[in-house]
Every structure is written in C-alpha cells, then in structure tokens.
Image (tube, grey):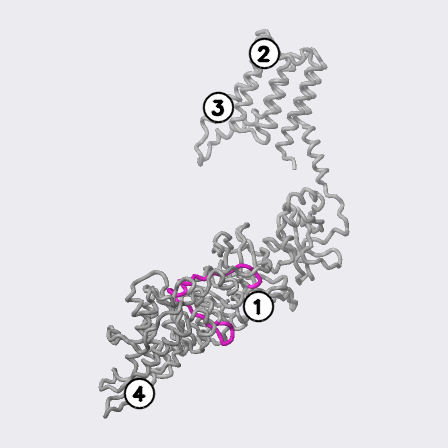
C-alpha cells in the first residue's frame, strides 16, 4: 500500500521534471540561472518543496518564516537588473516588502509565543492567523511567480502563458496526485464476489475475537473453514468457523477472528469490502496453515475462554468434546506469546435464554493453571495473569513417549513428567491417600526405591506384609530373620515387677529397638531397608500391681509398638546430629491403625502412643527424620502428623472428610475430581514436587518404572555380614533418656 507521503514525493520529482522541460523549451534563456529563471528556481521549486514535503497540511509560523525568507532572497537577486525608480522597481520592492513583513511577523510570533500550558492572547492569535495564511507556500510563492512573470516575461506572451498555466495546474489542480489516487482507488475497488464464495453477512460482534455470521445460503459450514471478515470499520480479518449458536434471529455461525497474514491480505485486498460486513471463504495453502495457529491446530480446538476466568482457573466454553476429560491438558496464549498449559478439573452444563423460551445450551469446562514448560529445567514455570476473553483453547497434542527416569508420573497422554525430590519427601513428610486398590502401595514402593537410591535409609512398618515381597531385592533374608528374632526374643522376655512400669517386656523390647536402630543408622552399615509388621511383634506391659508374683499383662497394640520405633528413630537421629538431608524415613502403611486419630483408637493407650509418634515426626525434620504415610481412611489418621505432610498424593476417595481435608491442599476443583479418578492416577502437590501447583498425573507402572530406573540405580542389596548373637543387649541400652522410651 502506497502512503500519501510517498505519493507526494513521487509527484514532486515528476513536477520538477515537467518544469525543467518548460524552462528549457519555452523560456529563451533555457536552464541557465538568471532573472528569467526566478519563477522556476525561486518560485515553483520552493512551492513544490513547501507544499509537498515541508508543510503539506498546515503552515506553522516557523514554516511561514522559512517561506518568506526564501521568497525574499530569490527576489533580492533580481534587484541589479531592475532600473531604480521605475514601475518595475516599485513592483519588485512591494513584493520584497510583502515577503519581509511575513518573515518579520513570523519571527515576532515565535519570540512572543506564550509558555506551554498558557492561553495565547487574542492579538497573538490574530497575527498568527494572518502570518500562516499569507505565508503558506501557495500564497507567498504565487506572489513571487506573478511578480517574476510581470517583471521579466511580460513581453513574451508564450512564456507568460506557459509559466502561469504551469503554476495554476500544479498549485490548484495537482493532476499527478489526483491521477495516482484514482489509480489506487481503482485497484482497491471491490471486485464482484463469487456467489459460491459468499458465506454470509456479519450479524453481530462479540468482542474480542468472535463474530456471528448470518449465512446467505442454507449450507453447513464445517468447523475450521477459513474466511475473510470485512466491513467499513476496520481492516479485513481472518475468520475460522467454530460452531452454530441459537439466537433470536435464528441459528448463526460463530466465527473466531484473528489478524489476517500479510500474504493473504495482499491476495484478497479490495475483494471483500462491504459497508455492512460480510464473510467470504478463501483458499488457504499448506504454507498459510503453518503460519496461522488457529488453522494449524483447528483439529485440537476444544473451546474459547469464557466468563469468570481468573489468574488461577480457566473457564472455557466447550466447542469440541473429542478427547476432553478430567486431567486433559489445554493450551491457551497469555500476553500474546506465552503458551500456558492448564489441566481440566471439572465441567458443567449451562444454558442461556435468547428469546422467550428459546435456549442455547453448552458445556463449560474448568481448568487449573499449571504454567509454561521450561525445556532447560524440565519443569513448569508459573505465569502471571490470565488469557483474554474469547481466546481459543486447544487440547495439548498427545504424544507416545513416556516419562523420564526421574519422573514419578506424567500428565495423561503427554510426555510431560513430574519429578519428585526424595529427600524433601522425607524431611517435609509425605502422605498417600486413597481407597483400597488404586495403587497406593505400588506408589509407596517406588518412593522407597527412590529414597534408597539417594542413600536414605527406610524403616517400613507394614501391616499388609506386601513390602517384604515387593522389596525383596533390597533385603538379606538371613540377616533380617536374625533381627526379627532379636525383637521377638526381647518381646518375650518380660516378667512381673513390683513397679508395674518395669513389668512386662516393653522395656527390654525398647532397648532392643534402640540397639538395632543405632546399628541400622551407622554409616558403616550397608543395609538401607528394614521392614517390620507391628501386629506380629508380641510385646507386653504390666497393667496391675504385683501380688504374690502375679500381675495382669496386656499386649501392646500396633500403635504402641509404632510409637516405640518412632521414638527410637528420633533418639538415634538426635544422637547423630542435625542435617539438611534426609537420613531416615518411617513408612506408616495402614496409618489409620498405626497412628490413629484420637477418636478412632482401639485402646486408650493408643492415644498416648500416637502422640509420641507425632512428636517424633514433628521434631525429626532437623535431624533428617521424616515419614511416608499411607492410608485409605483419611478421617481416622491423626491430623497432627497428616497436617505436617507437605507433599500429598491424593488418589481416588469417596468420603467427605477426606475430600474436605484434601480440598485445603489441592483446591476444590481437584477435590471434586477424586471420586471419579482412575486407578494409578493421583493429584500431587507439595514441596517435593517439581510443579508449584497441584496437578493430576498418571503414575508409573511398576514394571515400566523398574525397567527405566534400575539400570542406573540398581537395588542396594547388602553383603552378607556377621550377625551378633540373638538376645545380646547392652546394659546401657536398658536406660531410657528422659524416660521417653
């Protein structure tokens, strides 16, 4: 598109060529500079530069000053050739005086101009109006040319006619500018539209980015059909057909609009203009599709941004439901160029009354912002703000590649993985919550393997007896059998005592646990995993006073035995000293039995026992001690420990207490998804996660995980070592610091 400034510059060059031809062919002196050329060099040339380049629209006082001085200097050069005190001298003097007055008034106006922000006086305005009017290029150089013609060409009628005709044509009619503008108008004049290409007229605008089109023919326009939308209010836009919506005028085609690429704009310029607004279909090449995101991704267009979208949650009207489900990833642009990923967490149906009882029904999806993917650090980065209204929303393209070795899982149908820091899982505690059979134990087994790979020792308190089988690659059966035999022997060693606090086998068992814990956490010990079932350890406590060598005994509950292991772990970790890295993880499998809530205990002693276990977890972080808590009954687990779990894996759950508790961590949107979530899926959130927001992921399958992970992280199977005789317990271990054990 040629601009008006370019038109004026081209016209200037052509006008100067015409003037030189007139001067050389008609004026006797030709192109030689003298008084016969004043009209050309001083008049027409200055007129053209002034009106075409310097002051094409308005002449300010500074422009009037330049014009006056230029004209005056051109006339002064003619003074030597004019006889003094003649009529010609008076004409020349009057013309020079006129130019000088215009220049002088312009200088005074510039000097006396009011400061910025103040209103100029009436007198200043009057003189300004006169100066800019008389000092315009057409007036002042018209006077100069008229004087030059009278003084130097009046005896040659041909020259007078040629000069005046040239001046009038250039100054008044401007034929070249008019001719160029007419040519451009003709080129841009709308061409007849092929009836087959006409889609319809624009019925309404839903700003920003949506146009409703009333079709001209009864035909079905497929989603993704490209078109050009044009009206008198702005430049043509690219349109992409979305769907049909009901309005009081009938069904209308909804069209998504975007800027028209330059190549298509040049190709269709002038062909689709209308005073009312029309939509015309266009042919788009593969090259065009590669440059236009809306066309390139049209098969994955799932909706447009709807009302109530916030910086945290995206609400979008569903256009295409194919492939859309809870956990699906959607992509939308924020700020024009940031490709931000959201995860669908909910959906509802809505309707809109358009006229009387006519309704427009649609589905609206809710998605939570995850962020933008950082390839360098392989994680999602947070993005501030939110997308614009009516922006297109696309489903993320599905990929076949699975997660990388260090990922705990991946977003469904994508290769985007979520990594877990095993050390922070321990130091900041982790909980796996969900109903029976959704994969909690397999997830816990994977986390245990990752912890051991980082040199973190793990003590599993397992009521299910699964861990010993699933983690057999990390155990020395003979060694473990000896350790269990020691504890069984210690649990059977109790006797009656006059002081019932010393009766039973509890104290002997405590000492044995402390001894084993010290050996387990010794840096020279190459055992990284220890597994016990608290329900299989028989330990007694004396509950009545001594009477003729008889007393009443009770067996310690799994919760009480758990508290002994927890207290021993804290004691030994404190003896070793503080650390920022995880040292020992206590795995509470079936935590609702091992560390129950106060109102869910099976015996009164469980309340005290749970409090001791909770104290160990609360104080253990700075000593490298933490826990991995697994339960299917969130409501029955002590909240003292559960509230300390900074990383949460929320799997399928139905109870309201569990959903309410998890809603505080993962948000109401994800909490609402939990009842319908598939097995081996989890919402993960917390400090150990590589994502800063809660995300729904597909967890690793155990066999696939081990096939990827174990080649670089083989199981740390201990070497057979000498085992101390069973039942050897140091006397100093019988003494419990502070009476806690």
Q: Nearer the viewer, residue 351 or 486?
A: 486
Compare marks 2 and 4 and give the one earlier in the sequence: 2
Label 3 with label 4: CB-CB less than 8 Å = no
Q: Residue at x 48, y 23 (%)?
A: 107
Q: Which residues are magenta?
A: 412-441
Q: Position of residue 554 (x, y in %)?
A: 32, 86
Of badges 1 and 2, the one in the foreground is 1
* CA distance separating discs 3 and 2: 25 Å
Is residue 474 toward the left or the right of residue 241 in the image?
A: left
Compare marks 3 and 4 and give the one earlier in the sequence: 3
Compare marks 4 and 1 and give the one earlier in the sequence: 1
Tag 3 residue: 107
Q: Position of residue 552 (x, y in %)?
A: 29, 89
* CA distance separating discs 2 and 4: 135 Å
Tag 1 residue: 348
Of badges 1 and 3, the one in the foreground is 1
| Residue 113 in the image: above or below residue 479 | above
Mark 4 Cα shell of 10 Å, populated few (<14), some (14-19), many (≥20)? some
Tag 4 residue: 553
* CA distance separating discs 3 and 4: 116 Å
Tell me if I can see residue 676 in this picture: yes
Is residue 561 toward the left or the right of residue 362 in the image?
A: left
């Amino acid at each position: 598109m040629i601009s008006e400034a370019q038109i004026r510059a081209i016209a200037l060059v052509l006008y100067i060529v015409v003037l030189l031809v007139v001067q050389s062919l008609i004026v006797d002196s030709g192109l030689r500079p003298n008084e016969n050329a004043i009209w050309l060099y001083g008049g027409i040339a200055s007129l053209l530069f002034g009106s075409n380049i310097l002051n094409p629209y308005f002449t300010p006082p500074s422009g009037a000053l330049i014009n006056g001085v230029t004209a005056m200097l051109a006339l002064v050069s003619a003074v030597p050739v004019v006889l003094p005190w003649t009529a010609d001298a008076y004409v020349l003097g009057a013309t020079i005086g006129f130019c000088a007055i215009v220049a002088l008034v312009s200088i005074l106006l510039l000097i006396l101009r009011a400061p910025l922000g103040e209103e100029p006086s009436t007198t200043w305005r009057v003189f300004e109006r006169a100066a800019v009017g008389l000092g315009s290029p057409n007036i002042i150089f018209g006077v100069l040319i008229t004087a030059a013609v009278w003084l130097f060409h009046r005896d040659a009628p041909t020259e007078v006619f040629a000069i005046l005709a040239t001046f009038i044509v250039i100054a008044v009619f401007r034929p070249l500018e008019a001719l160029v503008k007419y040519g451009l108008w003709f080129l841009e004049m709308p061409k007849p539209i092929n009836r087959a290409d006409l889609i319809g007229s624009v019925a309404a605008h839903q700003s920003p980015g949506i146009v409703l089109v009333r079709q001209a023919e009864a035909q079905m326009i497929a989603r993704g059909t490209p078109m050009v939308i044009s009206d008198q209010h702005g430049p043509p836009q690219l349109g992409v057909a979305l769907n049909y919506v009901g309005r009081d005028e009938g069904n209308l085609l909804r069209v998504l609009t975007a800027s028209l690429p330059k190549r298509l704009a040049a190709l269709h310029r002038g062909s689709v203009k209308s005073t009312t607004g029309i939509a015309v279909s266009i042919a788009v090449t593969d090259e065009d599709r590669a440059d236009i995101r809306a066309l390139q991704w049209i098969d994955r267009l799932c909706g447009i941004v709807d009302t109530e979208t916030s910086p945290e949650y995206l609400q979008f009207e569903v256009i295409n439901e194919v492939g859309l489900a809870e956990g699906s990833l959607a992509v939308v642009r924020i700020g024009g160029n940031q490709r931000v990923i959201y995860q669908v967490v909910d959906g509802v149906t809505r309707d809109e009354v358009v006229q009387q009882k006519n309704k427009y029904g649609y589905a609206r999806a809710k998605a939570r912002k995850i962020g933008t993917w950082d390839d360098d650090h392989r994680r999602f980065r947070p993005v501030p703000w939110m997308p614009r209204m009516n922006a297109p929303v696309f489903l993320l393209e599905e990929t076949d590649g699975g997660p990388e070795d260090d990922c705990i899982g991946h977003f469904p149908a994508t290769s985007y993985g979520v990594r877990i820091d095993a050390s922070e899982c321990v130091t900041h505690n982790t909980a796996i919550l969900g109903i029976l059979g959704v994969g909690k134990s397999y997830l816990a087994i994977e986390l245990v393997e990752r912890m051991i790979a980082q040199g973190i020792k793990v003590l599993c308190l397992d009521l299910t007896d699964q861990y010993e089988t699933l983690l057999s690659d990390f155990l020395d059966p003979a060694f473990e059998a000896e350790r269990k035999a020691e504890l069984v022997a210690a649990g059977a060693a109790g006797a009656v005592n006059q002081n019932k606090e010393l009766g039973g086998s509890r104290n002997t068992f405590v000492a044995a646990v402390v001894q084993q814990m010290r050996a387990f956490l010794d840096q020279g010990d190459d055992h990284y995993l220890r597994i016990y079932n608290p329900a299989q350890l028989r330990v007694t406590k004396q509950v009545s006073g001594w009477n003729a060598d008889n007393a009443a005994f009770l067996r310690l509950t799994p919760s009480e035995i758990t508290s002994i292991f927890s207290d021993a772990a804290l004691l030994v970790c404190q003896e070793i000293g503080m650390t920022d890295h995880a040292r020992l993880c206590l795995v509470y499998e079936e935590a609702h039995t091992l560390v129950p809530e106060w109102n869910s205990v099976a015996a009164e002693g469980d309340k005290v026992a749970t409090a001791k276990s909770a104290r160990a977890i609360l104080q253990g972080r700075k000593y490298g001690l933490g826990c991995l808590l697994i339960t299917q009954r969130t409501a029955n687990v002590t909240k003292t420990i559960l509230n300390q779990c900074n990383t949460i894996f929320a799997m399928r759950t139905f109870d309201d207490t569990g959903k309410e508790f998890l809603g505080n961590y993962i948000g109401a949107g994800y909490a609402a998804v939990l009842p319908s979530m598939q097995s081996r899926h989890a919402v993960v959130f917390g400090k150990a996660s590589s994502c800063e927001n809660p995300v729904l992921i597909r967890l690793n399958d155990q066999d696939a995980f081990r096939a990827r992970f174990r080649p670089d992280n083989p199981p740390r199977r201990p070497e057979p070592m000498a085992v101390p005789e069973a039942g050897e317990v140091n006397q100093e271990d019988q003494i419990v610091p502070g009476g806690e054990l």
